[in-house]
Amino acid sequence: MRIARYTTGEDPTFGVIEGEPGQEVVLEIQGDPMYQAVVFTGNRVPLEDVRLLAPIIPRSKVIGIGRNYADHAAEMGGEPPAEPLMFLIPNTAVVGPGDPVVMPRQSSNVHYEGELAVVIGRICKDISPEQVKDVVYGYTCANDVTARDLQKSDGQWARAKGFDTFCPLGPWIQTELDTSDLSLVTRLDGEVVQDGTTGDMIHDVATLVSYASQAFTLLPGDVILTGTPAGVGPVETGQRVEVEIEGIGTLSNPFLRRG
C-alpha cells in the first residue's frame, strides 16, 4: 500500500495511491494511518491534482546512518565502521517532494545523498533483528543532504546534516516492500550520479533498526536513513536531484541558494 500525505489547497490529509502510472488516483482516508486503521472517506482525486507533502513529519527524530556502503566509505577516504555509525537529524530538516532544498550561506559545498528511509510504526526498545518486521510501518525515499565542508570543519555532523530543508522525504510511504535488493538511483539534472542497490548495504534494515533501538526508544513516525551508495557530489543552485528507489517511486527536489 502506498500512503501519501497531500493537500488540495486545504489542510493536509492522508490517502492511498492506486492505479497505474499516469492514471493514479488518491483515495482519501480518515485521520492519520500511523495511529488508526485505514478507513476511506469516499473522496478521490487524480494524483496530478494534488500537492504531495512529506509523507511523515517525525514527532521525535530522524536517525541517520553513516558509511553503510563500502564503496561510499572508500570514496570518503576511510574504512566502513565496524558497527553502524549513527547521528541525529532534527525533524525541522524534513521537507517533501518538490520542496526546495535551501543551501545555507555558511556552506559552499552541499552534497546530495540518495537513501532508503525506514518509517517506524510502533514504539519499541531493545528489539532483535527478528522483531523488526513487526515495528516497521513502511519505507520511503530520502535525500540526506550534507554540507560537506561543515561536516569536515565541525568534527561532528549535527549542523552539516541538520539545516532546515536538508532531509527531503517522499513521495509516499510504501508499506509492503522487500528491501533486500532494491535498485537505488540518484540523478542530478537527469544524469545518473548514483547507481546502487540496497543489497550492498553493510548493515541491512533489520540490523539497523535493532541497533538503533538499543540506544533510543523508537516512536511511531521516527525515520531511519540507511546510508548512501557511492557517487555523492556537489549541487549548484538551480539544479534538481531525483532519488528513485525500486518499488517506491521518485523523490525530486530543486536546490536553491539562500540570498
Image: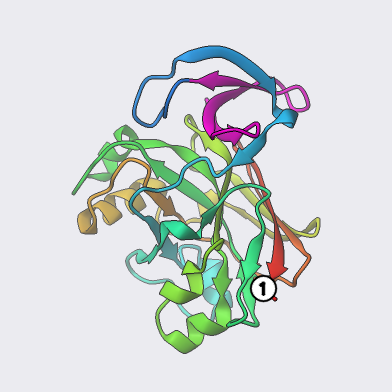
Where residue 221 appears, x then y in whole percent? Answer: 37, 43
Name which residue type carries label 1: Arg
Tell which of 115 and 236 is nearer to you. Answer: 236
For the residue pair 58 and 188, the one nearer the viewer reads as: 58
Q: Where is residue 169 in the image (x, y as percent from the top left)?
A: 55, 49
Quarter of the figure with the C terminus? bottom right
Return the residue nearer the eye: 39 or 152: 39
* Horizontal and vertical percent position of residue 43: 60, 15
Highlighted magenta segment, given as a residue range: 1-29
Taking the magenta stretch, the answer to whether it contains residue 12 is yes
Instruction: Give the residue drawn at x 71%, y 70%.
Output: 235
Position of 127 compared to 192: left or right?
left
At 54% from the left and 35% from the top, the residue drawn is: 12
Q: Which SS class for mark 1?
A: loop
Which residue: 32% across, 66% down? 83
| 246 shown above or below 15 | below
The residue singled out by tag 1 in the image is: 258
